[in-house]
Image (spheres, rainbow, N blue to C red):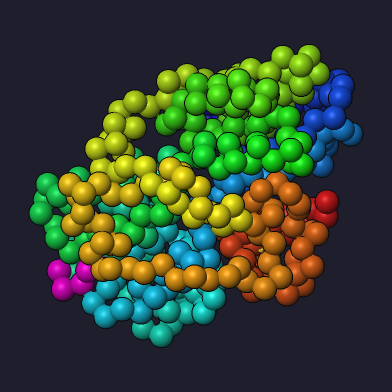
Amino acid sequence: MRHVDEYRDQALIEPLIAELHRSVQKPVRLMEVCGTHTMAIFRSGIRSILPAGMEIVSGPGCPVCVTSAAHMDAFIDLADRDAVRLAIFGDLFRVPGSRGSLAHASSRGAKIDVVYSSMDALDIARNHPDDLVVFLGVGFETTTPGIAATILAAHRQRIDNFCVFSTHKVIPGPLDVLMQDPELRINGLLCPGHVSAIIGAGAYQPFVDRYRLACVVAGFEPADLLNGLIRLARQIAQDRPAVDNIYTRVVSWEGNRRARELVDTVFEPADMEWRGLGPIPGSGLKIKQAYHHYDAEQRLEIVIPDVPEAKGCICGQILKGQTTPPRCPLFGKRCTPAHPIGPCMVSSEGTCAAFFKYGADT
Ligand code: SF4
């Protein structure tokens, strides 16, 4: 398959591994900022061949994982309301709230449809005129253009029984918060491939300027990842931080202007609560007043409850790159993918799920 096979070619990979080992000349502590990168690094086996001196921690790049416990409870409360029908992405279904999950709500009769896109949710609204279909908006810059297009389609087609509960987030805000933490000692970012397709590689220049962070935008195949790690190690060894985009088959410096315009038509920046990080000014997106009819929070007068994290769960610390899942006392014991305590064990992009699936212990 074009653009895939050539990035998995063993003849290419072995010299890259050797080069990666040569490139690490001083301690390298990297953060990967994308749940898909978390999984890809494990799946490709790269984590097990990292050179001594190179450490990779996960960041806040799994959208389900960074959804706050309070928002999860609000979702579950909503599911239990009469005449409300939820449309959700599948990863949310089993995420625990303080009083069960959406799966539990479904088993007691709540109407919940798992969809692949927000347009599917609009179809459900069209086919169930007696229900108010609420799409649970969870995701980053990659997801929001599609949601904006769906709200505009609902508006155009006068589909009134559809709205969105927006907990959408943007990635630069939490990175800025994290990089101000001197204890984190991150000296390079493996920047997210998908989000960068929208915001552009240029969005990371402020992190180079402010924090002297090495930044590389990379794809998800083994050669992409190894090249990304090599470039980061070289920048750090030479003390010449810069934004290096090696995923040019998908990501440009400017990103996707049309997609951002679509988002700006429907959404505006808002303060947002992140699991582990708390509220971050301007790091979320709320629906503009012009489209308030499609804003579930306004339409249904949703009150976000005050909810503590699950007892013993350290997802918040993991999402900040402060620790790794095996250091959680519940990991693999009380908390497993079959019986998750926190979202990082449920999501297909969760760091705990990745460590569990691939049997990593550090
Ligand atoms: Fe939370 Fe489970 Fe991960 Fe521990 S292993 S941090 S309880 S999700």
**Residue 353 horizontal side relative to residue 2, left or right:** right
Number of numbered markers:
0
- Rendered image quadrant of residue 178: top right
* Coordinates of residue 359 in the picture (x, y in percent): 78, 56
Q: Is 262 or 249 nearer to us in this picture? A: 262
Chief SS of the magenta region: loop
Residue depicted at 67% across the width and 73% down the height: 311
Residue 71 shows up from this direction: yes
Q: Judge whether 55 appears above or below 154 on screen.
A: above
- Left or right: residue 197 compared with residue 131: right
The residue lying at 73 percent from left, 30 percent from top is: 187
* Residue 347 image offset from top left, x and y in percent: 57, 58
Residue at 31%, 38% (x, y): give it: 263
Q: Is residue 266 magenta?
A: no
Please state the horizontal and vertical placement of residue 22, each as a whole percent of the image.
86, 20
Q: Which residues are magenta?
A: 129-133
Judge left or right: residue 357 versus residue 255.
right
Is 108 situated above or below 74? Answer: below
